[in-house]
Amino acid sequence: MIFREMGKVIFNAEISEGIFKTDFIAPGISSNSKPGQFVNILPCSDWQQVMRRPMSIASQSNDEISIIYKAVGEGTRIMANWSIGEKVDLIGPLGNYWEGLESCFPIIIGGGVGIAPILNLHNLLLETQIDHTLIMGARHKGEHFFPHEPQKNIFLSTDDGSLGIKGNVVDALKSIYPNSNHPHNSKIFSCGPPMMMEGVRNYSLENQLECDFALETIMACGIGICQGCTVERKVTESNAHSYRNRFALACMDGPIFSGQEINSCM
Amino acid sequence: MHVKIRDIEFSSPLLTASGTYGYGHEVQDMVDVNQWGGIITKSVTRHPREGNPPPRIAETSAGMLNSIGLANLGVEKYIEEIIPFLNELQTKVIINIAGSGKQDYLETMEMLESANGKHVGYEINISCPNVKEGGIEFGVNCDMTEKLTQEMRKRTDKLLIMKLSPNVTRIEDIAQAAEAGGADAVSAINTVVGMAIDLKTRMPKLNTTFGGLSGPAIKPIAIANVHKVFNAVKIPIIGIGGIATAEDVIEFLLAGATMIQIGTMNYQNPNLGTQIKEELVTYYSQNGIENTEDLIGKVEYHSN
């Protein structure tokens, strides 16, 4: 079931450098969404920007949902300025969700704009008491908003070494995974900037680790109509030219894709 | 608010523009699709099409560029999977057909004609700017437009609507060719050829370099084209291009449109059809308008 709701803003603030969090009251979306799914948001009904913005849901409970985003473009800058009490046009929940969590040891990796679905997954795994490893990457410590706690399997990385492991999330993964007692059925779940995810994907493929990625694409409708949010998948000769095989839609076939089925996260 | 094209009556002049409302079922959770005067479905082609490589869309000022490349499941699957759903709708259905050659168009129509669909007509896409063989060769050529229209006319008694491109020297000539070929109506306009460049990468924002511009940005272009066509043909015109409000609808009617289609703004507001319908009712009653016909082509020129 897809809902269109006027979500009431009850919290909107910068939680770390350039990164904003907004909480909405949106009962329909909240009670029907699963970690990994997204909402398609209309930042304002101004025609200057005609397109909605797809945003991963960072949490859902008690009739509320939250989103976490970087204020980088015109749409997200409008969002960062929403005031408390404002009603925002939301469509959701949309897309697929993180799956297969019980049958593996999840290593979940987020960074930059991709932290929302990873945080949501982290909380789901805590709730369902599934042991896992969390890796979060940022350029420097100002972009992180929780502590580096290796004893709890929470690892932060920073490009400049100002907090946690120095380097990117792949460096963090390399320093943790081979030395630890991660079981053979470890599986990576990741979301972040395309370059980061591609690094994680390459590492996963080289090490025969299963991996799922929540991809971000440009998107208009979010419900399979406009066919704009294309993700290229590997195809065999026989299905090469059929509809939605080679060019899948992030909104309907994703946003989560297996690292093996796509050519690249970029 | 009822309008007629030939013998087919629509409950309102509001239709969905092809490709912007799928087959109607995608929005069902949120919207009562039967509030529309009619649904025009996404282009179907003789064979399945994978479409163009990404990126396929880009946002521009008050609009968007697209280059989808007619991605669709092909007419065989369309008949199997989509027609049964469309047959359940209370509103009128018009099927949009695209093709890469005359044979493609004709075979697709023949298959749909024998498919037991309840659809009331066809809109023929001879104006897709995003596919090399996407019918635009027909849409820019009067002779080919007339011949294709004639051939399709022979194959159906349902409504036959030719969808015109603004990317031509004289749209009114193409409209006359469609009229001469036996079309019941023309729809205008398809998207306007556009391009946008990403300054960081210096690459076009669309994989195919050029794409089709839609949204409020193109409304004045659409109004001008509708009016030119209105002055050139006797058959009804279905106006399309950036409609976002009831006022926009009235503007199109005054320019000469009998019906209109809403496209890009459906993405922002899937319920726009219902909303505009309600706004139109208010506008009609506040302005003493009894019939939509009283507005069609009633633009008044400056007197000097």
Image (tube, coloured by chain):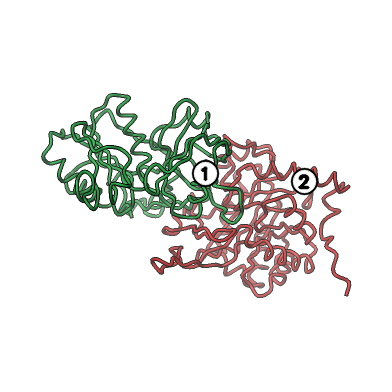
Q: Residues within 10 Å of mark 2 (few under 14, many from 20)?
A: many
Q: Which residue is mark 2?
A: B280
Chain A image colour: green
Q: Chain of mark 2?
A: B
The percent coordinates of residue A85 (x first, y second) are 57, 36
Q: Marks 1 and 2, how far apart in space?
A: 27 Å
Marking on residue B147: none
Which chain is rendered red in the image?
Answer: B
| Along the line of sight, the residue nearer the viewer: A96 or B121 | A96
Could you say whether the residue bearing mark 2 is in a helix, strand or loop? Answer: helix
Q: Chain of mark 1?
A: A
The percent coordinates of residue B225 (x first, y second) are 71, 66
Rendered view: B155 above or below A181: below
Labels 1 and 2 share a subunit:
no
Rendered view: B187 above or below A171: below
Side of B102 relative to B5 (left or right): left
Confirm whether residue B74 shows in the render. no
